[in-house]
Amino acid sequence: MKFRALLRSSAALWTAPVWSGIVAFYFFYALHFEDSYEEVIGGPLWAAQQVARALNYFYAFAYGITLGLATWEGGRLKHDRVWDLAPSRARWHVAVQALAPAVGAGWAILLLPVVMRLVETRLLPTPTSVLPLVMGMGIVCAYAVVGCVLGHVAPRAIAAPIATAATYYMINKSSAYSDPLWPRHLSGQLDTSVAFGEHYSPATVLLPFLVAAAVAAAVATWWSRGPRRLPLRLLATAAALAIFVLSARTASGWGIANGPVSAGHAPVRCTGTAPRVCMAETGGAIERLEDVRTEVTGSLEKLRAAGVDVTVPSTVTDGLLYRSSSRPRSTTSTWWLPLTAQADAAGSDGRIEGVRYAVLLDSVTFPCSFPTTITSDAPTAWIVNRDAAMLWAAYTVDAQDPYLHWRAGEYAQFANGPEVLAKVKERAAKGRSLPTAAQRTAWFEQEKAKACRQMPKRPAGSQATAGSQGAVS
């Protein structure tokens, strides 16, 4: 049968308004429900992240509609007695030809949102960014095989809509599983998101495809005709079970929304030396790179001029390159700061206050460690001394506003929160009012020492952090 005639007679054509309408609705409404068009194109933009977001709504639709259409076409092949009319033609050849429109519909449901998203964001796809798309297209083919067989063993008018609805429901609900975990990762609807600079590791996209392909191969083997097919059918079934069990065991160890991803792939641009400042090229603020470095070096110079013992790092790197959970920890030689995020949030005067604030938090250290969080019943004496010293340093680099905003939020849990804030401001003002730079520096060191002396003893092994790091992500 010629392709045009095949397409005209296929259920994929006369159902096209339904599934294409679903694609249009979910792309233009659901996909932009949380993020407006302006927020999407505002960045940071990363092809793998945008492809993953575009596909998230459409896996279940693609698989369900493909299965339903393939079931219908399989039932039609049986009803029209195609095998009796063309007994010399290979069964697989006839099935592939009949299922091509159904597979094309499933592919279109996945391809259209990806293409529209890349056009919308003006991004070019990369081989690693389209891995989830390739996975989905492969699984669509597997569902088409299963649907064709289903259409031969069940009435198509009943089996096709039930198969479509059941598949959509099961795939869509797979993300709700917590015990067992493997359905979240093997259903073909990826449970793991990718952040800027990341792409899916091969195992994340390969295991769902292997499971679907193995099941489809086993089903097709049982449906095939010919002598001595039983050993082949048993072998295909055993292989499918082995692949499923091994994949489920592997995926069960990934955790919720925590499949393997590979990070740190976004290109960077650097400038200067000691420190060398690097920002993400496609983060949306690379044109501010020189301004960012000026803020970094200026803040370091002001702190050192004020007598703060600051170790100048060799490299200051953009925190956007890694999500916070996988980002390397800052060291004395390498700092990870939210450069792009703070450059994007620059004020109307063009000054990047957030970068100065981030430099402050990584620069000022204490001779002791402090708790990572403050509870409402915590004693406030050491908090006042520590925060007064930090506020004094914040005034030195003109970052007092974000620091006070952050601490005011922390103090809100105290019954005497306003009094604590007033006391911190009063002590910082006292240090700033001292007549000489040496006296101000001596006051700063004394205030840090007092904070450490007044801090309550912690149980062994409790979590703590030095200074106030971690306030800026």
Image: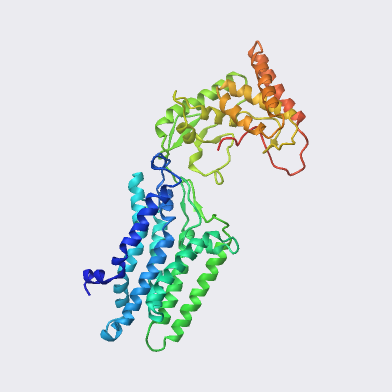
Q: Residue at x 65, y 13 (%)?
A: 433
Q: Is residue 238 above or below residue 171?
A: below
The answer to whether 8 appears left or right of 227 in the picture is left
Residue in the picture at 72% in, 36% down: 376
Provide residue 153's location: percent of width, then percent of height: 41, 81
Residue 308 in view of the camera:
no
Which residue is nearer to you in this view: 439 or 394?
A: 394
**Residue that lies at the very extreme toward the top in this rendered image:** 435
Q: Residue at x 59, y 60 (%)?
A: 178
Left or right of 225: which side holds 257? Answer: right
Vertical position of residue 468 compared to residue 422: above or below: below
Camera-side residue of 268 and 380:
380
Residue 28 seen by the camera: yes
Residue 326 vs 102, above or below: the answer is above
- Residue 346 against residue 89 in the figure, above or below: above
x 41%, y 58%: residue: 58
Q: Position of residue 60 (x, y in %)?
A: 44, 62
Q: Is residue 182 left or right of residue 374?
A: left
Based on the displayed image, in which of its 4 quarters is residue 68 positioned? bottom left
Residue at the bottom extreme of this rendering: 227
Q: Position of residue 304 (x, y in %)?
A: 58, 21
Q: Position of residue 248 (x, y in %)?
A: 55, 66
